[in-house]
Every structure is written in C-alpha cells, then in structure tokens.
C-alpha cells in the first residue's frame, strides 16, 4: 500500500516537472550543452503548397517624423502669359518731331568777309511766308568734304586752261583734314579719285588731265550723277563745279536737274564759270570757235548761278587768272565760317512737299538790321542760304 502511494506521488511529480519545463522553457536556460547534437533539432522548411507569407518576428521599427519647418514655403506665382506678334515680328513706336537745320553765311557785299557775332533774335526765318521760332544759332568752322566737278572736253583750249587754273587754285587752298574727290565730265562722268585727304593723290589726278576725250559737255547729267553719289555721304557736302555751264547732249532736262538740286539736302554748290576772257574779247557775244557759240554765254552762266543760289553757294566768272586766289578765299571763308540755325517748323506734316525758306536779319524792333563800318558808314551785306527744303514722307 505504501509502495503504491510512493509510486503515485513519484509519477505526479514527474508529470508536474515535465509541464513546468514545457511551459517555462523559454525563461529558464536549458542545462543541456549547446553543442550537443542530440539536443539540436533543425526545423524542416514548409512545403511550397502549405507555406504562407513569411513574417518578420523582429522588433517593429517606427519611422521618425519629419520636423516641421517654422515657415511654410511662399506660393509661387503662375508664369506670365507671353503674347507674340504675328510671325514673331518686332514692332516699335517712334515719334519724329521735325527739326530743320539751315547753314547760313552772312558776308559783306564789298569785301565778302564773314560777319561774326550775330545772335538768335537777329535772325528771322520765314517758311512759306510763316515766321518760325529759331531755337539755336551757332558758328562752325570745320573741315570740308567737297567734290571737284570739272568740265574736261575736247571743245576749246581756253576753256580747258581756265578749268585747270581754277582747279589748281582750289587745290592749293585745301587743308590737311579736308576730304576731296575729283570727277570730270564730257559725254560721260569719270571718277579720277574718290574722297581722300591725301593731297598727293589729288595732285596726281589733276596732272592726268592732258588729253580730253569727247567734245560734248553733258553738264546736267554730270551734276545729277554727282548729287546722287554724295547724297549717301553723311554730313554737309560741297560741290566745286568748274565749267562753261553749257549742256549739249544730256538725257536730263533743266527742270529735272533743278528738281534734283532742290531734293538733295546738305549740299552746297559753288560754280566757277570758264570762258569769261573770251567772252569779253568777243564783245559779250560768246562766239568762241568750237566753244560755246551754239549756246548763248549768258544763258550758260545763268544756269551755273542758279545751281549755286538754290543751295546757298556762290557763283563766279573770273576774267583774269589773278582773281582766282581771291575767289577761293571767299569760298573758303563761306564754307568754313557759317551760322547753323535750327528750328521746329510750324508745319509738321510729313507730306514730301517743298517748303520755301527765306532768312532775314532784323533788329530788336523787327526792322531790317543795319550794319556800319568803323567810320559809321552803312555797309551792305548778303545772306547766303538755301531757298528751301523738301519735307519728309511718312515712310521716311
């Protein structure tokens, strides 16, 4: 009996010890050594059919929250919509206010000396008979840009000699900073040298005038072509035209050349008439053998004077060679010393019309200005200026 009880108690204790080990095996380390192969078992991998999703038994990782910025970012404005012109063309707006610039020379009639010291209130400018307000008046003395337009034709020895004497006199009056071109004409124009300030080149071109070609003198054509060429040159230009003034075979008529002179801005023409001595010898008849007998001498000279007066220049017909130095001294004095007047016309229309301009000198009361010499004697003076200008067109 006692033996049965002991066996029953031993069996209960063994069962209890097994349950404790099975339930608390993870909290108490096993006394079996880790390197005992008998105690180590490798779990068999699950079959592919019964395997479920594998789970991570490791610790749960919680991501750290981003730190909030102190100020929220400013909202970005939407891009401005760009409007393009048709065909990507560029357009601009320009307002042109007309401004007229006049070159005016005031000279004493007797000595042809330049009259200095005039003030803006003393100039009265009339455009188509309407008084204009003169804004500025200044005196300039600048280098010149000039074309020597020479008649060189096989018509008369005396005309050629007069032309050569006059051209050499003008050449000697040039300054180092002057630019000069040399053009001759007979039936056609011939450019001997383009604009240059090399006096040696100009001298060589004048020395080459030895044997003339045609006997015709197409004065109108030559002047028209010269005006057309120098219109592309910036600034004020001058034409020193030396010839008889007669025209024999030009395609351009007198009316067309006068219209061309009017329409060409910033050009002043000075004319030196040849053949004055022979005209005096023949009693004013102009009857020179092979020269200008087919055209009245006075008519030819009047054409030269018209070209000069329309552009504010001077015209001369020297009889003796000794007059030439004084002639070109007057031309130089007129070219290098002049007043430049600017005004804004009351007629601001860009209609391409020709505006007649007249320049007068007045005193403080609006009366014609009187001049006197050192002895108090009244002296006459002349005002040299263009007689008008052509207004711009709307497309210019």
Image (cartoon, grey):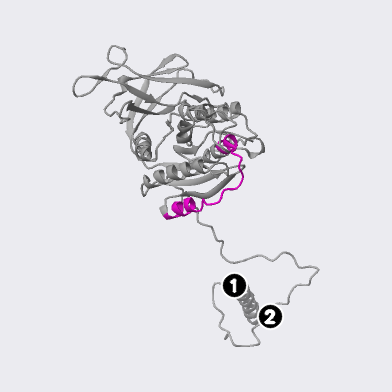
Give the residue furthest to the right. 49
- Mark 2 to mark 1: distance in Å? 24 Å
276 vs 390: above or below = below
Q: Position of residue 313 (x, y in %)?
A: 43, 31
**Stretch of the chain drawn in magenta:** 200-224
81 vs 389: above or below = below
Label 2, on which residue? 42
Give the residue furthest to the front. 282
Which element carries disc 2, helix, strand or loop? loop
316 vs 65: above or below = above
Whether 219 is among the magenta residues is: yes
Which image quadrant is residue 360 in? top left
Residue ID at (44%, 14%): 130
Q: Which of 303 and 55 is in front in this view?
A: 303
Numbered label tally: 2
Which element carries disc 1, helix, strand or loop? helix
204 vs 4: above or below = above
Residue ID at (74%, 65%): 52
Q: Which of 349 and 385 is in front in this view?
A: 385
Q: Position of residue 396 (x, y in %)?
A: 56, 31
Q: Where is residue 45 in the image (x, y as percent from the top left)?
A: 73, 75
Q: Nearer the viewer, residue 183 or 28?
A: 183
Q: Is 221 left or right of 69, judged from the image as shown?
A: right
Quarter of the picture containing the N terminus is bottom right
Label 1, on which residue? 20
Q: Is the residue marked by circle 1 packed among few (<14), some (14-19), or many (20+) residues within 10 Å? A: few
Q: Where is residue 374 in the image (x, y as percent from the top left)?
A: 19, 24
Q: Is 250 left or right of 171, judged from the image as shown?
A: right
Residue ID at (78%, 72%): 47
Q: Is residue 308 visible?
A: yes
């Amino acid at each position: 009996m006692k033996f049965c009880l002991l066996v029953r108690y031993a069996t209960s204790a063994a069962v209890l010890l097994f349950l404790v080990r099975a339930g608390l095996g993870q909290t108490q380390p096993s006394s079996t050594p880790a390197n005992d192969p008998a105690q180590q078992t490798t779990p068999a991998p699950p079959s592919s059919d019964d395997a479920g999703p594998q789970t991570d038994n490791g610790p749960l990782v919680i991501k750290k929250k981003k730190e909030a910025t102190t100020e929220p970012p400013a909202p970005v404005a939407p891009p401005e919509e760009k409007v393009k012109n048709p065909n990507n063309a560029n357009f601009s707006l320009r307002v042109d206010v007309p401004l007229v610039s006049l070159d005016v020379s005031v000279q004493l009639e007797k000595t042809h000396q330049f009259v200095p010291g005039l003030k803006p209130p003393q100039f009265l400018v009339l455009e188509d008979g309407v008084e204009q307000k003169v804004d500025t008046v200044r005196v300039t003395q600048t280098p010149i840009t000039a074309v020597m337009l020479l008649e060189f034709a096989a018509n008369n020895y005396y005309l050629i000699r007069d032309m050569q004497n006059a051209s050499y006199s003008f050449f000697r009056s040039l300054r180092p900073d002057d630019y000069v071109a040399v053009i001759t004409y007979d039936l056609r124009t011939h450019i001997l040298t383009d604009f240059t300030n090399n006096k040696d080149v100009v001298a060589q071109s004048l020395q080459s005038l030895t044997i003339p070609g045609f006997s015709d003198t197409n004065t109108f054509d030559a002047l028209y072509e010269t005006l057309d060429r120098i219109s592309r040159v910036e600034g004020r230009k001058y034409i020193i035209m030396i010839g008889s003034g007669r025209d024999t075979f030009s395609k351009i008529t007198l009316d067309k050349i006068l219209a061309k002179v009017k329409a060409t801005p910033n050009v002043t023409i000075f004319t030196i008439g040849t053949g004055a001595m022979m005209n005096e010898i023949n009693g004013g008849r102009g009857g020179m053998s092979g020269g200008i007998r087919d055209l009245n001498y006075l008519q030819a000279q009047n054409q030269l004077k018209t070209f000069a007066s329309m552009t504010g220049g001077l015209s001369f017909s020297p009889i003796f060679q000794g007059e030439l130095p004084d002639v070109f001294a007057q031309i130089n004095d007129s070219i290098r010393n002049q007043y430049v007047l600017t005004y804004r016309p009351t007629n601001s229309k860009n209609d391409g019309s020709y505006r007649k301009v007249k320049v007068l000198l007045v005193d403080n009361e609006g009366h014609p200005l009187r001049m006197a010499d050192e002895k108090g004697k009244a002296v006459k003076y002349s005002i040299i200026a263009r007689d008008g200008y052509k207004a711009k067109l709307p497309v210019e």
